[in-house]
Image: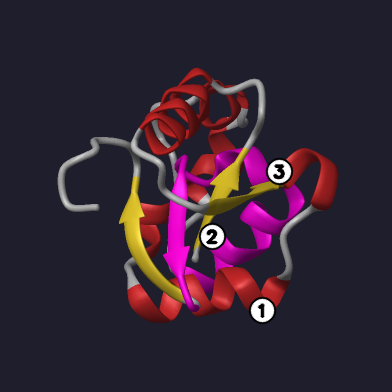
Amino acid sequence: MLTVYGISNCDTIKKTLNWLKSNQMEFLFHDYKKQGVSRETIENWLSQTDWTTLVNKAGTTFKALSDEQKAAIVDSQSALELMLEKPSLIKRPVIENSGKIVKIGWKPEGL
């Protein structure tokens, strides 16, 4: 079964969940804001993809960071710490199947 990670009030997440429902795909939704996200989960993702793919630089949370905070994101470890502190920095959605990332960001192709 798919697990969709994101934030419930995110328009991209709403589109993703609606598409999955309309295509009768079973999934669990994990809301970062309500349920948090563990270090182990993000470490698992970083073992499968580069931190530059996982950090959402187009989002309002990233844009609100100070120049010093942005400049401090230089590798997986620094990105991990900031994503733990501010989960809304994680690109949405991250879709997993049995712990393996199947998609980051939303376009229905490839599911």
Secondary element type, mark 3? strand
Q: CA distance from mark 1 to mark 3?
A: 16 Å
Residue hosting label 2: 79
Closest to the camera, between mark 3 and mark 2, is 3
Q: Is residue 8 magenta?
A: no
Mark 2, mark 1: which one is toward the viewer? 1
In the shown orientation, is residue 80 left or right of residue 53?
Answer: right
| SS label for mark 2 | helix
Q: Nearer the viewer, residue 25 or 13?
A: 25
* Mark 3 surroundings within 10 Å by alpha-carbon count, few (fewer than 14), some (14 through 19), many (20 or more): some
Q: Which residues are magenta?
A: 76-98
When asked about the image quadrant of residue 64, the answer is top right
Dot 2 amino acid type: Ala
Q: Position of residue 72 (x, y in %)?
A: 54, 53
Residue at 54%, 60% (x, y): give it: 79
**At 59% from the left edge and 65% from the top edge, which residue is drawn?**
80
**Residue at 35%, 77% in the rendered image:** 48
Which residue corresponds to mark 3?
31
